[in-house]
Amino acid sequence: MPSSSDLPVDRLAIGQLLVRLLREFRTEMFAPAAARGYADLREPHLQIFGNVGVDGIRLTDLAARAQLSLAATSELVNELQELGYLERRPDPGDRRAKLIFPTGRGRQALDDAGGRVAEIEQRWSEAVAPGDFTAACRTLQHLLDALTGAQDDHGPAPTS
């Protein structure tokens, strides 16, 4: 049975790598928010924006995607609704339920966030050897798919 002494000494353990990279990503993602017209957003809102999509989603599904409690998700959605980024509409498949959609302002924020992600990925890919970032992302995607049983529905793989 492997033990901690079997871990590589030339890098952090996978959990630390993932947590620290996520922290770096969120910091970079949120850094220009105020200057780009989103001073009313808080960093926890990123968890909702990263999972809400544009086609409408039920609160329970959003909570599962965002890996947040239903109460935390509801609170963040309420805040974003009050700020004008999200709206609730009746679910045409079940009129008792509501779907959460981005408003025009929310769609603009999502578009701007997508651009920011592209900027971050470009910068990070330039920080390592050519092709390493693409290969690392592809490997992480394959690992996630294998662990979750997900199908390859991520579109064409980027070329390095």
Image (tube, rainbow, N blue to C red):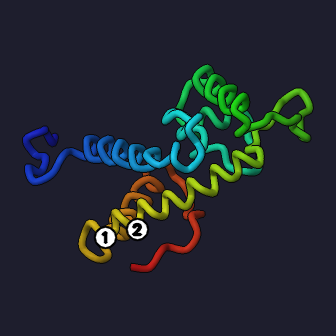
On-image quarter of the C terminus: bottom left
Residue 28 vs residue 83: left or right?
Answer: left
Query: Residue at 43% of width from left, 46% of height from top?
Result: 31
Residue underneath mark 2 = 122
Question: Label 2 neighbourhood size at 10 Å, few (<14), some (14-19), many (20+)?
Answer: few
Residue 68: give x, y in percent of width and height.
Answer: 54, 29
Q: Residue 151 falls in which quadrant of the image? A: bottom right
Residue 44 vs residue 51: left or right?
Answer: left
The secondary element bearing badge 2 is classed as helix
Residue 35: give x, y in percent of width and height.
Answer: 51, 47
On-image quarter of the N terminus: top left
Residue 15: give x, y in percent of width and height.
Answer: 28, 41
Identify residue type, mark 1: Glu
Query: Residue at 36% of width from left, 65% of height from top?
Result: 123
Mark number, residue 126? 1
| Along the line of sight, the residue nearer the viewer: 52 or 36 | 36
| Along the line of sight, the residue nearer the viewer: 41 or 64 | 41
Q: Is residue 154 positioned above or below 42 on the image?
A: below
Question: Label 1 neighbourhood size at 10 Å, few (<14), some (14-19), many (20+)?
Answer: few
Query: Residue at 63% of width from left, 52% of height from top?
Result: 110
Q: Is residue 55 positioned above or below 132 on the image?
A: above
